[in-house]
Image (tube, helix red, strand yellow):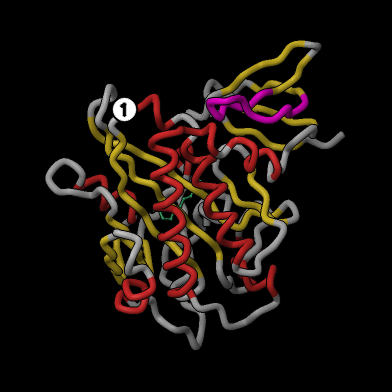
Amino acid sequence: MAGLGGPVASRSRRAMGAIVPLDRGAIARALSSAGLAIEVADTVDSTNSELLRRADGTQIHRHLLVAEWQTAGRGRRGRGWSAVAGGSLTFSLGWRFEQGAERLGGLSLAVGVALARVLDASGYHGIELKWPNDLVHEGRKLGGILIESSGDALGPIRAVIGVGINVRLPAEIHREVGVPITDLTSISKTQAIDRNALLARLGADLAIALESYSTEGFAAFRSQWRKRDALRDQRVQVLLPDGSTILGVAAGVDADGALLVERNGRRLRFVTGDVSVRPRAC
Ligand code: BTN
C-alpha cells in the first residue's frame, strides 16, 4: 500500500465492516454553495488518471471525482496508493489556472494547508505538513496529495489535485506498509466518522483555497504552512532524482514553496519535482 506510504502490497478490494457508503446526494447537499460538480464512483483505476483522461475533451474545472475504491491509485514518484473501501477518502478535484505551469510550484503545499485547516476544525488536531505533499500526525503519515496537470505549460493549465486520506484502516494494513501510518479514527478516538460530511467540508474549503491560490499564489499560505512544518529545524536527508542524497538541516520553505536546507553554512533550495526528503537519525 504505497499511498499509505510504501510499495503496493495488494490491489484486492478490502472493506471495513459496517460502513456508511459515500453518497453523492449527501455530499452535494452539504456542498450546495461551493460551486463544485460532484461525481461519486464506486470503482475507478485512479481518480487522478480519470480526470486527466477527460481533461482535453471535457470541462474538469471544479469537478470533484470521489471514488470508494481505486484499482490503480497512484502516489508521488511512481509509487502506488491503495486504500480501504469504506475506510479511506480518495478524491481528485480539477482546477484551471490561467497562469500556466509556473503557478503550480507551491500548490501541493497550499492544498496541504487547506486540508489541515478543515481537519483541525473537524476535531483532528495536531496535523502537520511534510514537504511537499504529506499530511502527518505525530510522525505518522495520514494522507498525501498528488498534483498532475494537462495543457499548455504557458497557460492556461488544467491541474488535477488528488487527495488520499486514511480514515479507518484495518490493523493488517498498518503492518503491511513500510512506513509509519495513522488514520483519523486513531487521532480522534472516534469510531463513527461521517465521510460524506467530511468530504463536503474538504471540497468546499479546498475550492476557496484554490480561488485564493489562483490570485495570490503560495504567498497567501506560507505563514500557515510554516506553523505546520513537520521537518522544521530537523536534520534531514534529501533524495535527488539521480539517487544521490544531500544531508542538512531543514529551514522551511521560500515564497515559492521550495524547500530550504542549510548545509555547511549555505542555504540550498529544492523544488518539488522528483525530490523527496526525510528526517534522519542523529
Ligand atoms: C502521495 O502521498 O504520494 C500522494 C498520494 C495521493 C493519493 C490520491 S488518492 C486520490 C488520487 N488518485 C490517485 O491515484 N492518487 C491520488
Report x, y in % for residue 55.
20, 44
Q: 75 or 65, which is in the foreground?
A: 65
Does residue 156 appear to the left or right of 105 in the view shown? left
Q: 15 or 18, which is in the foreground?
A: 18
* 219 part of magenta stretch: no
Report x, y in % for residue 32.
32, 69
Q: Is residue 13 above or below residue 243?
A: below
Q: Does any atom of ligand 1 lie closer than 8 Å to the CB of label 1?
A: no
Q: For the point 46% across and 37% down, which residue is it?
A: 107
List the single residue furthest toward the bottom: 18
* 253 part of magenta stretch: yes
Q: Is residue 237 above or below residue 162?
A: above
Does residue 194 appear to the left or right of 21 in the view shown? right
Report x, y in % for residue 2.
52, 52
List the single residue furthest toward the right: 282
Q: For the point 68% across and 72% down, which residue is it?
A: 188
Q: For the point 25% across and 31% down, which residue is it?
A: 156
Does residue 195 appear to the left or right of 49 in the view shown? right
Residue numbers of the magenta segment: 249-260
Q: Residues within 10 Å of mark 1 (few under 14, many from 20)?
A: some
Give the tally of numbered discs.
1
The type of residue carrying mark 1 is: Gly
Looking at the rendered image, the quarter that the C terminus falls into is top right
Q: Which residue is mark 1?
A: 100
Q: For the point 65% across and 52% down, which residue is it?
A: 136
Snapshot quadrant of residue 174: bottom right
Q: 170 or 235, which is in the foreground?
A: 235
Secondary structure type for disc 1? loop
Report x, y in % for residue 120.
63, 61
Snapshot quadrant of residue 229: top right
